Image (cartoon, rainbow, N blue to C red):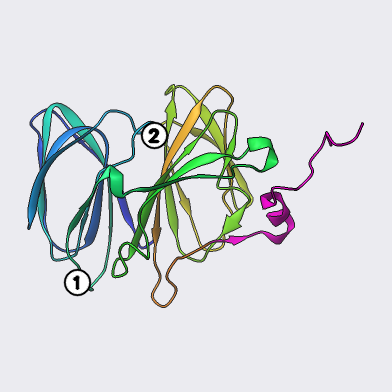
Amino acid sequence: MLLDFGILKLAGGGRHASGAGLERAYLLLGGEVQVQWEGGSRRIARRSLFDEPPWCLHLPAGGAATLTAGEGGAELACQATANPRPFAAHLYSPEQCRSEERGQGTLRETSTRLVRTVIDNTTAPSANLVLGEAVTFPGKWSSYPPHHHPQPEIYHYRFLPARGFGLTAIGERAYVLADGDTVLIREGEVHPQAAAPGYAMYYLWVIRHLDGRRYTTPTFLPEHAWTMDAQAVIWPDEEKS
């Protein structure tokens, strides 16, 4: 996958030292943490990953940082990959996160979802990581229409309530998703998602740029691309008497 991925859980007062070696991104899932890196220090907090955009510390391979949890502890998603290119470390704030409702106005809102982009080819042109979040509303679809790209990708899921579930099709393989699951998406595999009615589905997504093939936009399956048309008519056709 060309990526390292893990969940860092810190008890109250717990400390994690991140040394140099790989490009890294620490995205706060919940709790409070003091972040110190070369060039800055900030106490950050997040109460709900469903309702609030994230904080994310992005470090080059030569950068180091220290994360110290507040009294109630903290949980962070950690992504890392090889990248020899230098760039300045940066703490992305919730205000710097690009949030948009995708699918809005199509298919009677059955695929409307919230997508938050933190790191991409425009915000970090020297990075090898692309990182963001998606919040799928109960009973709706996400990562839709089905699409694919040559770059490897990882999805990590959470549900509200936590006992919820969702479904995905990775290529030709279908999976039931539960809170805390992680899936790997390899080159060319389509990956639509659906949340069960009554349960909101969050997933963190991280893509790894390829040398000479940086990620910008996915390729939609042509047989399903018509569903992006706001004027597309679907059954039952309410325009007919």
Residue 111 falls in which quadrant of the image?
top right
Q: Quadrant of residue 53?
A: top left
Q: Which residue is mark 1?
A: 86
Q: Which residues are magenta?
A: 218-241
How many numbered marks does the figure carry? 2
Q: Residue at x 44, y 25 (%)?
A: 160
The one of 202 and 172 positioned closer to us in this rendering: 202
Residue visible at 27% across and 28% down in the picture: 47
Image quadrant in which the C terminus is located: top right
Relative to residue 121, is residue 16 drawn left or right?
Answer: left
Instruction: List the residue tagged with mark 2.
Output: 180
Magenta residue check for 236: yes
**Dominant secondary structure of the residues highlighted in magenta in the image:** loop
Q: Can residue 198 be seen by looking at this rendering? A: yes
Q: Is residue 35 visible?
A: no
For this view, does 150 lie left or right of residue 116?
Answer: right
**SS of the residue at dot 1?**
loop
Observer-nearest of 138 and 207: 138
Is residue 200 toward the left or the right of residue 53 in the image?
A: right
The residues tagged by marks 1 and 2 sit, at their Cα atoms, a distance apart of 33 Å
State which tag comes first along the sequence, 1 or 2: 1
User: Neighbour class for label 2 at 10 Å: few (<14), some, many (≥20)?
Assistant: few
The residue sitting at 59% across, 42% down in the picture is: 104
Secondary structure at badge 2 equals: loop
Give the farthest residue toward the bottom: 212
Q: Position of residue 181 (x, y in %)?
A: 42, 37
Q: Residue furthest right?
A: 241
Q: Is residue 238 magenta?
A: yes
Amino acid on which the number 2 mark rests in the picture: Gly
